[in-house]
Image (spheres, helix red, strand yellow):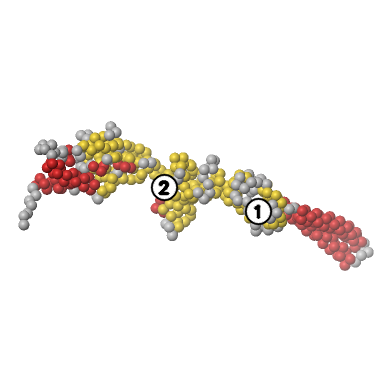
Amino acid sequence: MKLSVISEQDARQLSCLKSIPAPALILILAWLMFLPACSDNGAKGSGAPPAMSMTVPVTVAGATQQTVPVEVRVIGNVEAYSTVTVRSQIDGEVDRVYFQEGRDVNAGDLLFTVDSRPYQARLKQAEATLARDIAQARNAQAQAERSTQLFQAGIVSKDQYDQFQTNADALEASVRADRAAVESAKVDLGYCTVRSPIAGRSGNLMVHPGNVVKANDTSLVVINQIAPVYVDFSVPEQHLADIKKYQTRGKLRVRAMIPQDERHPAEGALTFVNNTVDPATGTILLKGTFANPDRRLWPGQFVNVVLTLTSRPKLVVVPNQAVQAGQTGQYVFKVKPDLTVAIAPVVPGATVGGLTVIEKGLEPGEKVVTDGQLMLFPGAKVQVKNQ
């Protein structure tokens, strides 16, 4: 059996290959295997250049220093600032609808009228009963006053005197009850007109003229207040300490982005932190309040929420595509002044707006490769396309 002996130089070259990323290593080996075939078919001295002498075209970018916001990104849900289900407070037939469903209404706007004729009749009956009892009470009071004089003169007995006084007091109580009945009839008559308690957007019309409604049973329409509006979102509980710390310094900024239009986020502020962490999910509910003057946020809509806690100045950032993942961790290809590249292990941080924060491994001003990494290896010669 024939044994192969590896020279010291070959051993050094093999150890150097360990630092080359796997995709580039595969391409180099394929290129080396291809070279003998080319040299056999061609004339002597006309073989292709070695792989290590290739110049790889790349795109580069400089590492810069920026002030980077510390953010929490989650998915949220738009909630109406207030929701009112309008119901009838009396029984009766819907007489007329005064608004168009799906349109804005103002607080105090007339929405419905219920047939008021039965309640007008009850009011007149209560007023007539009050007038009758007032007349009887006046007569009873006059009799009580005369009986007092006659009792003092010894003309009537104590029993007769007490009877006149009791009759006067009873009729006075009847008058007070009649006055309350009149007020109650007026209230019921007022309920025949249904007005909007808030300003907002009306929903689906649930009754129409001619429908019979029952007191506190039939829903007429739902009104949502959407200017301002809430955005509900939940964050992992590990962010709670930072949220409480930075909230003491002022209101925290919240942005809500519609998935199809993330370039124009709605601006709001954090106004609610729930008083408990959900033990089932390990998250805590938060709410942001948005003025929503253009009505872009709609109740029930899902949005991407960005909660900004604070800002960190003078952080080193590079484009996201510059950071590569290897077997030993993440790295970038750093371009040297002689236009060769070296692998620089980095510790990436947060990603904001297409940029990745480099916590460790790069200095401001250093050049990194953002496109063309597939053909690169330590010491490879590069040609900068975006020079």
Q: Is residue 258 above or below residue 219?
A: above
Of 222 and 182, nearer the camera is 222
Q: Quadrant of residue 58?
A: top left
Question: Where's residue 314, x and y in %?
Answer: 34, 38
Q: CA distance from mark 1 to mark 2?
A: 43 Å
- Residue 45 seen by the camera: yes
Total number of numbered labels? Answer: 2
Residue at figure coordinates x 64%, y 46% from the top left:
100
Number of other residues with Cα within 10 Å of mark 1, as a class: few under 14, some 14 to 19, many 20 or more? some
In the figure, is residue 288 to the left or right of 224?
Answer: left
As helix, strand or loop, the secondary structure at mark 2 comes to strand
Residue at figure coordinates x 33%, y 40% from the top left:
319
Of 318 and 31, nearer the camera is 31
In the figure, is residue 277 to the left or right of 93?
Answer: left
Q: Earlier in the sequence, mark 1 or mark 2?
A: 2
Question: Where's residue 318, x and y in %?
Answer: 32, 40
In the picture of the structure, the residue carrying the numbered disc 2 is: 73
Single out the residue that lies furthest toward the top. Answer: 387
- In the picture, the quarter occupied by the N terminus is bottom left
Q: Is residue 211 above or below residue 262?
A: below
In the picture of the structure, the residue carrying the numbered disc 1 is: 207
- In the picture, the quarter occupied by the C terminus is top left
For the residue marked with disc 1, what is the amino acid?
Val
Question: Where's residue 376, x and y in %?
Answer: 23, 42
Q: Quadrant of residue 34?
A: top left
Number of other residues with Cα within 10 Å of mark 2, as a class: few under 14, some 14 to 19, many 20 or more? some
Single out the residue that lies furthest toward the right. Answer: 155
As helix, strand or loop, the secondary structure at mark 1 comes to loop
The mark closer to the camera, 1 or 2, is 1
